Amino acid sequence: MNLGISLENGFREIWSHKFRSGLSMLGIVLGVSSLVATLALTAGIERGSRVFMAQMGGLELVSVVDQEISNQNLDFWNLSPGRTLQDAVAIRQSANLISHVSPELQEGLPVSSGTETMRVRVTGAWPDYMGVASNELAAGRFISDLDGEFSNRAVVIGDTIAKQMWPNLPPEQILGKILFIQEVPFEVIGVFIEYVRESDRRAAERKVKNPETAVPTRRSRGSWDPFRGKNQAVVIPFSTMFYEFKSGKFPEDSVDTIRLNDFNVRISDLNSFAPALDQVRRVLNQTHRGVDDFGFTTREDWFDSMERNIRGTRISGGLIALISLLVGGIGITNIMLASITERVREIGIRRAVGAKARDIFLQILIESVSIALMGGILGVLCGFGLIDILNRLAPSDNEPFVTVAAVLLSVTFAAVAGIVSGIYPAIQASRLDPIQALRYE
Amino acid sequence: MRESRSSLTTPGLPIPANVSLVFLENVTKIYYIGDQEIRALNGISLSIDQGEFVSIIGPSGSGKSTLMHLLGCLDKPSAGRMEICGYDITTANSDKLSDIRNREIGFVFQSFNLLPRLNVLENIEVPMIYTGASASTRRRRSEELVERVGLQDRRLNRPTQLSGGQCQRVAIARALVNDPKIVFGDEPTGNLDSTTGKLILEMFRELHETGRTVVLVTHDPKIAAVTHRVIEIKDGQIERQYDPRKTAI
């Protein structure tokens, strides 16, 4: 018996009992819509975290940090120069799995445009600073090797600093302005873009669209802004930093031996993460003369816990959805059983004119799958609606979005629920004795 | 494709004209209701040739319905040998029986047994669905048959919108749709008034005249009188057989 007719029959049957079929679909609609919504929410969280990760430098960013020396090395502690510029030079020369090396010196210093003054953390860095943590410029250029060589008084500033120092000036017009860092004049050669969280960006968009109904942004409520540090960046060449602000403090320090405040490297390919770390470790073992006073912090732990959270949300949401699907499936089984007792005679007639037991089995199964699939499609639509409502009521950092895979998965679950719940009634129907069924009144 | 004939003919050769379409030898049917054994048929031997016009007659409880179900391949005998259209029914499985019902047998029931949600054309097409015919073939065939039973103007009506006689004509069209060898009528005029009943009976007679084997099951001697052979059943056994055209009732 061909599928087209079975489907047509199925829909005809459903149509002739619209209310009943609709009620029995309800569970499936509920299950599928909550599944779609859950998957959309977690997809949103996942995407948000990934974007955030990328903006913060991604998994490829590894920090080289000071570490407690192990006991057997304790006697040699003074052999090691600690984290210095030499480490950076050595890594750049011999670790080919590392794409960027960024040694950094930092100092809290007053900066001033002449009219505005504030105290910020100033960073002395190599040109690699730009690539190590995926920074972007709104205008101008970043520090070059030449700036470092000549210890130029050039500075690249973050968006917050730019707005504080020169309110109402676009980034392009800030270029060439003089920024005083502890009374020393620096020329602004570049301005970073403004780093914003997803939620703030969308809130701003909404404000542009219809200013009256805009929801107050999170920032105004004073929550933690992960990009605060990046937006307050003031970056000058490494050597300038040393000669202008560091060299006077300890006469024995030279630009090569001064301890770094921060030291980040970027691994060129995530697939060779471990070998790259090994390379760095070997190089640093040389420069530190075998003293294990350094370690690495990676983003992996952070990333793992993020993944765990997403998985947890997905599982609990999925569980709720599956329970609804189960209940919905039982509803369909119930309706199908009622439907076949109503149609014993029809089944008898079909058997008498040549339908095989499996034709009847298929007919009932297809009917129940049709109900489930219709419920599934309605459920997907409801899921979209649900997400829209959620978005309006509670705009979050991570806008939920429905993926094709989520829709397919949900509809598949609905179909499976239809099959499972149809099997028992279908078996019952196909087992009816044709003669008994024909006599049934 | 039809399967090759079993014992009665050699596979591949044309079927002889007067071969037995129905062949029963010492057939018994036993039902169990609780512990009680009910012998509905008790040693029936019977053979019906191609092209015959036969009626099976008997009072209720005589076993004629059981015989009808066996002949219609709706059921299998408890003991004895039975062949329908060359197929050995005693060894056939349920799917095979369905197949035989579908292709070799047409049923006309007392209560019409049309599907209430389908229109006339769709009702006629139902057996073809299980043959696997395409939609266009089905529609062509059902249009042809609806014309033959004279219901062109009612072809899109539901059974509830038809009179009893019209329903029975749809049922006859449905019985003929797969061009079966035998047409069974189970009290086909039982739910009809006498005038309509006569018309339906006339249609069965025409079927016989166009070469089809027709078997009517009835309790009404007047209907049996139209046929060419009457088989009287009583207490699960054949009481007598006669040609009503020659024997006075």
Image (cartoon, coloured by chain):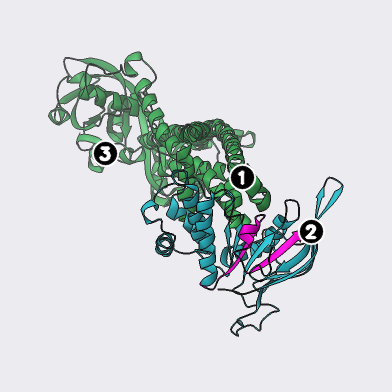
Chain colours: A green, B cyan
Q: What residue appears at the point 68 percent right and 77 percent down from the top-left corner?
A: B6
User: In screen coordinates, is A437 left or right of A272?
Assistant: right
Q: Element type at marker 1?
A: helix
Q: Chain of mark 1?
A: A
- Name the residue tied to disc 2: B236
> Is residue A334 within the magenta segment?
no
| Type of amino acid at the residue the image marks with label 3 | Gly
Q: Quadrant of residue B182?
A: bottom right
| Type of amino acid at the residue the image marks with label 2 | Gly
Q: What residue appears at the point 36 percent right and 40 percent down from the top-left corner?
A: A132
> Is residue B212 within the magenta segment?
yes
Q: Element type at marker 2?
A: loop
- Name the residue tied to disc 3: A148
The stretch in magenta equals: B210-234
- Name the residue tied to disc 1: A344
A304, A344: nearer the viewer:
A344
Q: Element type at marker 3?
A: helix
Number of other residues with Cα within 10 Å of mark 2, as a class: few under 14, some 14 to 19, many 20 or more: many
Residue A396 seen in this snapshot: no
| Type of amino acid at the residue the image marks with label 1 | Val
A437, B163: nearer the viewer:
B163
